[in-house]
Image (spheres, rainbow, N blue to C red):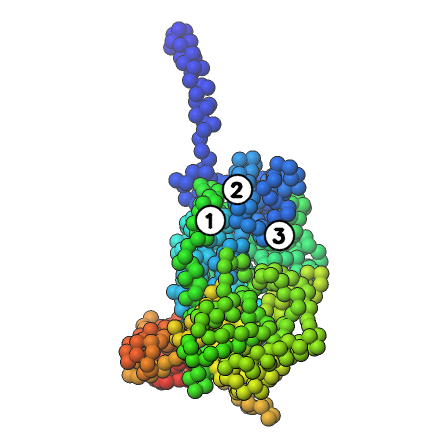
Amino acid sequence: MSYNASKILKVIVLLFLPSAIFAQSKIVPVYKNKAFTTQQRVADLLKRMTVEEKINQLLSHLDADAKNINENLASNARALETLKNGYGIIQPFDIKPERDVAIKNAVQRYLIEKTRLGIPVLFADEALHGAMRDQATIFPQAIAMASSWDTELVRKINNVSAREIRARGSHIVFSPVVDIARDPRWGRTEETFGEDTYLSAMMGIASVDGLQGGKTGKIDGSHVAATVKHFAGHGQSEGGVNQAPIEIGERALRNFHLRPFQLIIKNAAPAAIMPCYNAIDGIPAHANKWLLQTVLKNEWGFKGLVASDWGGIAQLAKKHKIAANEEDAAVLALKAGVDLDQSSGANYKLLKEIVKRDPSVLPFIDQSVARVLTLKFNLGLFEDPYINIEKIKQVNADPQSKQLAFDAACKTMVLLKNQKNILPLSPGKYQSIAVIGPHVKDMVLGAYSGIPTEKQSIFDGIKNRFSTSNITYAQGCYLTTNYPENSLKAWRQDKQDTATVEVNNKLIAEAEMVIKNADIAILVLGEDELLTREHWSSGVERGGDQATLEISAAQQKLYDVALKTGKPIIVYLMNGRPLAINLIQKTANAIIEGWYAGQEGGRALAAILAGDVSPSAKLPITFARSVGQLPLYYNHQPSAQFYNYTFFENKPLYPFGFGLSYTSFAYSDLKISSTEFTKGKKVEVSFNVSNTGKVMGEEIAQLYIQDNVNSTSRPVKELKDFAKVSLSPGETKRVVFQLDEDKLAFWGVNKKFVVEPGVFEVMIGSSSEDIRLRGEVVAK
């Protein structure tokens, strides 16, 4: 090359070098380029992160009233220090929608624009039965949803909750709860879908599907990530005491408590799992490698996030005493497979110093960070991190959500008694109706409730529907004297104040006079969130679990006085767990179990009382006669409940699956496609259900099996399918169920799910005790 040519080439290079450097600076990193797969983006981002940036992705921050991290970031040195290296998850609450938007947008903008890598944060919420937020749609409590036995209804409810929550900028929720509730003394019974494995699993699958919008892994801008909890056995703690040990063997754990999680992971692909607080056979779930690694990740192939329960890691040292200090607790949880530390990151913050002394924990940190980042990418946060206030207004104003809350309340109220068909009450038949009870003029919504834009009390619902009658009111007694303005505040409030006997006696006397002057009385009895709820210690003993199943003494006296007036009595139960109501069951004219029915509960009860809607719900949990019978559940071993107690019948007050209607149903023509079952095949079970009454109704047909002879003792009945059938008077429909290997299998002596050769009894019923049709299948 000549000297001149070389010189010209150098000039050309120099001329284009700045633009080349500029172009290079504009190349988008792989993690910010949505053209790449999530796995590629996570890997690229992970290798760019410092140890401190990684650890910050494993931290969480719960912020009541947004006191610590809020919209005033520029002047908030503490918040900036917390966020400067990115952050995993933040949960602000108790704030109005407008401020919610301002806070979340400000935080995201800072993280994306001011931090080195621009990683958005996850915002979290609760969605047990609606968003735990102001101006939300509040649906019936989970135990009530299970009473509907309607998976499509539950999917729709969770779909609405997801839309409302995502519109407010939250991305992950800590629901559903699929714990198997086997002791109604436990204050969290209301949060569950009841005592049955299969019903809980089906409700859980519907919930996750509604929240996430499908099982593809990608979650669009109208849905949220679901966290299935509490893994596992939380509902069978000693004495019904929250967080107490779980002393059951692997077989019971596998067959009953783990099974809902397994089925939900297989059929709905939840984004996250939350371990329970409890120790299982001496090993706390938050440090249980067998539970979180062997079973969850290795056997079931779960790839999602494991998020600790609040303070669950800290409890390894403070409560369970399996760690000497909080640093050891952090390492135990991390190595067991807990990805996210939900306790303002109190334990995982310590990993910054731990990793300097022990680099072997770094691969575990990387694995957990990868799972957090995967969820953020799957939610689309790197592309669409901000909130539009107009979307919130549009979603909150949706009249279809209010209608769904009404429909749900109607479908979840269980008619337990209807002596001489006193219900429905024809409007105008009774000139004066007394509505009595401590919470008649407000609507108790239950644990983890938000604040609805509007709600209708029982008194207002009855007054509006029975407008031609004179509706009178008396409080009757107090449950507590310090019940606050809404259910959210009640659930968070620690202290319970009770009335004196003299105060309650005065209220009972006033109620007696109101009832005497009426033609019929509707008594609203039960509990509220100050009495029975999640029990925890917050520096004071807040209470929540119960030592009894009876209603309070003041309510019992109120009922006795009402009974002595001789007037017809309709009892409506507002509660979150089964109650022992023996006298009421014997003497009331009608009983409706309404649970915590949501914002439209008052209107729904009035519709059922008037006959606008025929009750269709059935119990998802057994009602005991006495606390001394516990544990009492329908799918017990053959040797359980074999004998009566001395002078006491050991039978339930109301069995699992029970519920009355304003019409009647007949079952007939059972056909089983094959009397033999072989591996890989399916057996079809079909039968007719007919409406033999005079009004339209919905029947919940239930399929149970019993494995007659087995190498291990199996329950006397196990629910394996159900169907809700809508029928006009005189109409008949054919119901078809399928039995397959998954439904017949159990955890056998060889520590595998197997179907052993032998005879299975097939039972079709209207409840677990009201079996209408029977057949047999022989497994080969």
* Chain-order first, disc 2 or disc 3: 3
In the picture of the structure, the residue carrying the numbered disc 1 is: 392
Mark 1–mark 2 CB contact (< 8 Å): no
* Left or right side of 84 for 691: left
**Residue neighbourhood size for the residue with mark 3, other residues' Cα within 10 Å, grouped as few (<14), some (14–19), many (≥20):** few
Q: Amino acid at mark 1?
A: Ile
- Which type of secondary structure does the marked residue at label 2 adopt? helix
Instruction: Give the labeled residue for mark 2.
Output: 105
Measured as percent of width and height from the top left, residue 699 is found at 37, 76
Based on the displayed image, in which of its 4 quarters is residue 12 positioned? top left
The answer for how far apart the CA atoms under marks 1 and 2 are is 14 Å
Residue at point 54%, 58% (across, down)? 451
Image coords of residue 554 (percent x, y): 64, 78
Q: Is residue 327 above or below residue 755?
A: above
Q: Residue 605, labelled with which disc? A: none
Do the residues bearing badges 2 and 3 touch, measured as CB atoms within 8 Å?
no
| Sequence-first disc among 1 and 2 | 2
Residue designated by label 3: 64
Q: Is residue 317 visible?
A: yes
Q: Amino acid at mark 3?
A: Ala
- Pinpoint residue 29: horizontal percent, then vertical percent: 46, 35
Please name the amino acid that badge 2 sits on.
Answer: Asn
Disc 2 to disc 3, C-alpha distance: 18 Å
